[in-house]
Image (cartoon, helix red, strand yellow):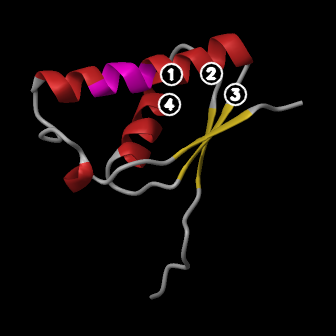
Amino acid sequence: MQKICCCTGHRPQKFPFEYGGKNKEFSTYLAELKSKVENAIIEYGVTCFISGMALGVDLDFAEIVLKLRKTYSLKLECAIPCPIRP
């Protein structure tokens, strides 16, 4: 049975700290998010991740999963919430 993890969260303007750059709060947030993703892989055997792909947490989560594919056999799916119109 495949185990799946989804993630969604704040957009950049909703963070209680300056989003992006090299500030301590942002670095800590990314490290914590990566730790949670790795925990899902190691502790729970998650191999499939789904991201809503919105700016902020969704994209950070997706980028972390893509980087971790160098170490683990993972799949990333992108859930687009509305149709793309030409």
Residue 39 at x, y percent in the picture: 58, 15
Q: Is residue 23 above or below residue 39?
A: below
What is the C-alpha distance between the residues marked 3 and 1? 14 Å
Horizontal side of 10 relative to 16 (left or right) equals right
Horizontal side of 52 relative to 6 (left or right) equals left
Q: Is residue 11 above or below residue 21?
A: below
What is the C-alpha distance between the residues marked 1 and 2? 6 Å
What is the C-alpha distance between the residues marked 4 and 3? 10 Å
Residue identifier under label 1: 36
Is there CB contact under 8 Å for labels 1 and 2? Answer: yes
What is the C-alpha distance between the residues marked 2 and 4? 11 Å
For discs 3 and 1, the disc positioned in front in the rendered view: 1
Observer-nearest of 28 and 72: 28
Residue 40 badge: 2
Element type where label 2 sits in the image: helix
Element type where label 4 sits in the image: helix
Residue identifier under label 3: 47
Give the crowd class for mark 1: few <14, some 14-19, many >=20 residues within 10 Å. Answer: few
